[in-house]
Image: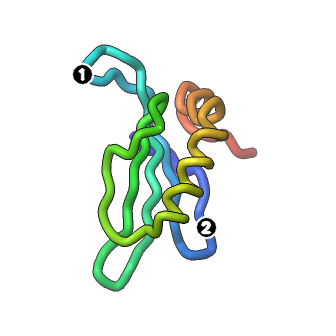
Amino acid sequence: MMYPFCKYSDETLVTFSNIVKNDNGEEVLYVHFERPMEYGFDSIRFELPTYKIVYEEGHYSKTEKEMFKKIVEKGAPYFYEWAREGGIKIA
C-alpha cells in the first residue's frame, strides 16, 4: 500500500509505503517520487533505512535526486511513524 505525502508545483507526487520485510527479514519502507511527463513519468524510489535508490526511470536531474534524498533522510522518522499509523491523518 502506498500513502500520499505531498504534491509539488511541478506535479511531482510523493508517496510512501507500508513497512514491509525485505529478503533479509529487515523492516523497510519505500518513498516514491513521480512526475507526469509527455512520454510517461519520471520516477525514483528510495528504500529506508538505507536511503538507497532502488528504482529509477525517466529524467530527474542530479540536483533533484539530491534534494529528494535529503527529504527522505530528514523525513525518515515521520515516514516510519505514518506508515505504522496507516498514512497521515488529517482532520
Looking at the image, which residue sits at the far front?
Answer: 62
* Pointer 2 local density, CA inside 10 Å: few below 14, some 14–19, many at least 20: few
Q: Judge whether residue 9 can be spotted in this image.
A: yes
> Residue 68: x and y, percent?
55, 54
Q: Name the image quarter holding the N terminus.
A: top left
Colouring scheme, one of rainbow, by chain, secondary structure, one colour: rainbow
Residue 67 figure quarter: bottom right
Q: Which residue is located at x 29 percent, y 81 percent?
A: 39
Residue 18 appears in the figure:
no
Q: Residue at x 38, y 68 (%)?
A: 42
* Dot placed on the residue nearer the N-terminal end, 2 or 1: 2
Q: Which mark is residue 23?
A: 1
Q: Is residue 74 above or below residue 40?
A: above
The reply to whether dot 2 and dot 1 touch (C-beta < 8 Å) is no
Q: Identify whether 55 is placed above or below 17.
A: below
Amino acid at the residue labelled 2 = Tyr
Name the outermost residue toward the left: 23
Q: Nearer the viewer, residue 26 or 14?
A: 26
Q: Residue sitting at 32 percent across and 56 percent down?
A: 56
Label 1 packing within 10 angstroms: few (<14), some (14-19), many (20+): few
Question: Which image quarter holds the C terminus?
Answer: top right
On the image, which quarter does residue 82 sit in? top right
Camera-side residue: 24 or 12?
Answer: 24
- On the image, the x and y values in percent for residue 57 come to 30, 63
* Label at residue 8: 2
Task: Please report the residue visible at 38 percent of the width from the left and 46 percent of the height from the top.
Answer: 53
Type of the residue with mark 1: Asp
- Left or right position of 91 against 54: right
Q: Dot 1: what SS?
A: loop
Q: Which mark is residue 7?
A: none
Q: Quadrant of residue 40?
A: bottom left
Vertical relation: 32 (above or below) 86: below
